[in-house]
Image (cartoon, rainbow, N blue to C red):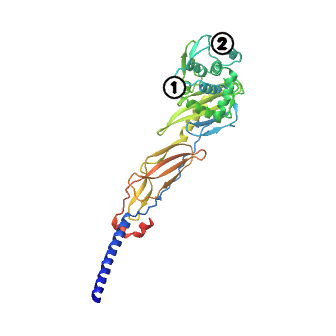
Amino acid sequence: MSPSRRVVLRRRRITVFSILLIVLVGVGYIGATNLAPVPASAATLEQPAALTQPVAAPVWPGFGESAIGAVGFPGVLASSGEQQTVPIASITKMVTALVILDAKPLGAGEDGPSITFTDADVDIYYDVIAENGSVAPVVSGMVLTQREAFEAMLLPSANNYATSLAVWAYGSKDLYLAAAQSWLAANGLTQTTVADTSGLSASSVSSPANLVELGKLVVGHPALAEIVALQSAVLPVIGTVTNTNKLLGRDGVDGIKTGTTDVAGACLLFSTDFTVGTSTVTMVGVVLGGDTHTEVNAAIASLIDSVKPGFHEVVLAEEGAVFGSYTTPWGDLSDIVAERAASALVWSDSPITGAVTAADVQLGRAGDEVGEVSFTIGTEAPTTVTVPLELQENIIDPGPAWRMGHPGELAAG
């Protein structure tokens, strides 16, 4: 082969190989850019503003000690007076009832087992009369259901039934008192001491804060909540018994227990339900140390009226509310929105703060969850409400043209 022929063939080979190389590189480039992941887009977030409400202004009694709380809210919401442990009179019977129910459970609407009263119960009746305590009749051989016996104890505040039921449940008064102290400790009522079943003893004491927690336990017990809400009941042998709580049915009051001794004065542990927006508030309160129950009842009616405006239903997020957005390098845009509406029931000026978080997103469909907005309510024992956040619009692949025109951004992704 002539030298010129070899040169031509070499040039042809170089040309073919060059073309093949270009084709291979092109194919590789197209493949790489179309298969490479797109870059993730960081969210631009809109943090919610802090929310505050007007300060509550309870109208407190001008005597004794008082406190209020509400089911679902930690601790005491507000109080007045020294907040010391003091005699609590027949409010003690609510401890008695709960401790007995710990040993002898009773469900909503249930009558419970039958209890036969004996000569020993008649002796208890006369012992209470000798102490100048409140009583309800008892006859040896009479039979009451557990619920009826509780009604005899709680509605007319019969001391003799408090003792008889404690002995029925625990075998003796001393064994009951030991169980009561263990129950109080287990329920965190460390400022409460019971020296008897009825509260006639001045050594049966508690603090307003503990009594608020006790009230929450009472309204949270279905059977007991039913009983303390009764204005009267007709019982076998005993006849009609009437609730000593004359506030029942006024201002939504549906419990709980009066107390009266010379040492304790006139007292009332009460509960009431009212509506705030779409929520129902179950408020529990106590007023201790009044001169008369007429005075206490008037003070509580004013207190309830003044407390109601202190609860607020606050809208935290509307469904579809915007909390940020994504903008992709290839021009797609999607807002970050609340998946659902959320609101919270708050007391007084409890602060509400919110924080938004959202993940970086490469691709996604409308409705995909991408983050959350979390609202913190209050500072002491705060509660949290979390709302999921989602894409409002699709974030789709940019397509071959953009991919091939932005290889560096793909590599960064």
Q: Position of residue 400 (x, y in %)?
A: 34, 66
Image quadrant assignment for residue 13: bottom left
> What count of labels does the image hold?
2
Quarter of the C terminus within the rendering: bottom left
Image quadrant assignment for residue 190: top right
Could you tell which of marks 1 and 2 lies nearer the N-terminus?
Answer: 1
State the residue in front, 35 or 114: 35
Whether 379 is drawn above or below 246: the answer is below
Q: Position of residue 200 (x, y in %)?
A: 69, 23
- At label 1, the amino acid type is Ala
Q: Position of residue 191 (x, y in %)?
A: 68, 34
Marks 1 and 2, Cα distance to the nearest angstrom?
29 Å
Q: Position of residue 23 (x, y in %)?
A: 32, 73
Q: Is residue 43 left or right of residue 81?
A: left
Whether 267 is drawn above or below 351: the answer is above
Quarter of the N terminus within the rendering: bottom left
* Local SS, label 1: loop
Q: Is residue 331 left or right of residue 350?
A: left
Marker disc for residue 388: none
Q: Residue at x 59, y 40 (%)?
A: 74
Q: Is residue 205 left or right of residue 242?
A: right
State the residue in front, 123 or 104: 104
* Local SS, label 2: helix
Residue 83 appears in the rendering: yes
Image quadrant assignment for residue 241: top right
- At label 2, the amino acid type is Val
- Residue that badge 1 annotates: 108
Whether 171 is drawn above or below 310: the answer is above
- Residue that badge 2 annotates: 122
